[in-house]
Image (cartoon, rainbow, N blue to C red):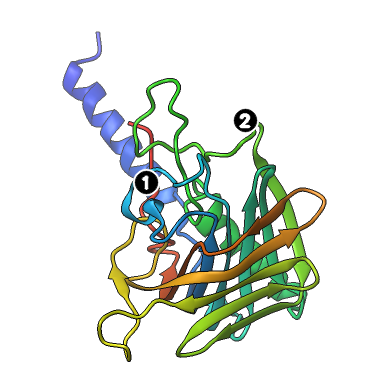
Amino acid sequence: MIPLYTIVLTVAIWGVAFAQQKPSPRPWRIKGKLTEACSCNVPCACNFGEGPSPYEYCYTMWSYWVQDGAWEQTKLNGLRIGGVQGARGVLAVLDARADTAQRAAMENIWQAVSGRMLCMMRLWPFKAGGISPQGSMIRTRYPDRQFLGYEYMPIEQVITDRGARLSFADRGGFEAAYIFGRDPSRPVTVSNITSWPVPISIKGKTVFFKYKDKFNQLDYQGTNANQGDFDLSHNQPGGQPMMAK
């Protein structure tokens, strides 16, 4: 009979060897400006770890404007990585100006940031089934929500000291005005929101929020918007994913 300590030692050696063989993540880092809006009232309760309001879903459009960044040796400066989430699923919207290498890099980053439990988007449980409020199911009108693929198109992302605007070619987009507090020179800000990986979010309210393609149709106004700076990498690809307990 093989002694127990021999078995334990062998398993430990195998574990160390396996860990050493595990490949390191491919290096990437992007920094820039996030522009986002959704179908929720202001302020979006999803930003604070609560369920959406006034609807039982939170549909969103967003764009990460990469002002400095790269996937390995492929530079991504000036490009935009965005998306649309609607009733039928989530569409990755990527900058049409990207060359072949940049397109592969942006798709990899989109999956690293969004595909990992789709943590760039609102992840909310259905009430049925007793899932935790920090569950990981996208709350939509349809149970068969899905990833709808990548589409490349012109993306216009304009940021001013009064608001922001995002356009996805002829599909639509949104415009948002910042909300100003008692000091009329300073917009309202919130730090450490749960739903988007920005340290400080400038709060806004949409003038319009409208989009249409073969999958999704969005048409709202007076809804929540966020504007903030992001710094994401292979070491910390986004906000804390909300996992079912």
Q: Which quarter of the picture shows residue 101? A: bottom right
Rounded to the nearest whole Å, what is the CA distance between mark 1 and mark 2? 38 Å
SS of the residue at dot 1? helix
Residue 237, x across and y down, in percent: 44, 62
User: In the image, is 143 to the left or to the right of 50?
Assistant: right
Label 1 neighbourhood size at 10 Å, few (<14), some (14-19), many (20+)? few
Q: Name the residue under label 2.
A: 143
Dot 1 amino acid type: Ala
Q: Where does label 1 land, which residue?
A: 19
At x 60%, y 78%, the residue is 165
Rendered position, 154 above or below 233: below
Which numbered circle lies on residue 188?
none
Of pointers 1 and 2, the one earlier in the residue sequence: 1
Q: Residues within 10 Å of mark 2 (few under 14, many from 20)?
A: few
Q: In the rendered image, which quarter contains the C terminus?
A: top left
* SS at mark 2 in the image: loop
Along the line of sight, which residue is nearer the eye, 63 or 99?
63
- Residues 53 and 127: in front is 53
Which residue is painted at 49% across and 73% down in the image?
34
With respect to residue 137, does 24 lie above or below?
A: below
Residue 229 found in image quarter: bottom left
Q: Which residue is drawn at 49% across and 78% down?
A: 177
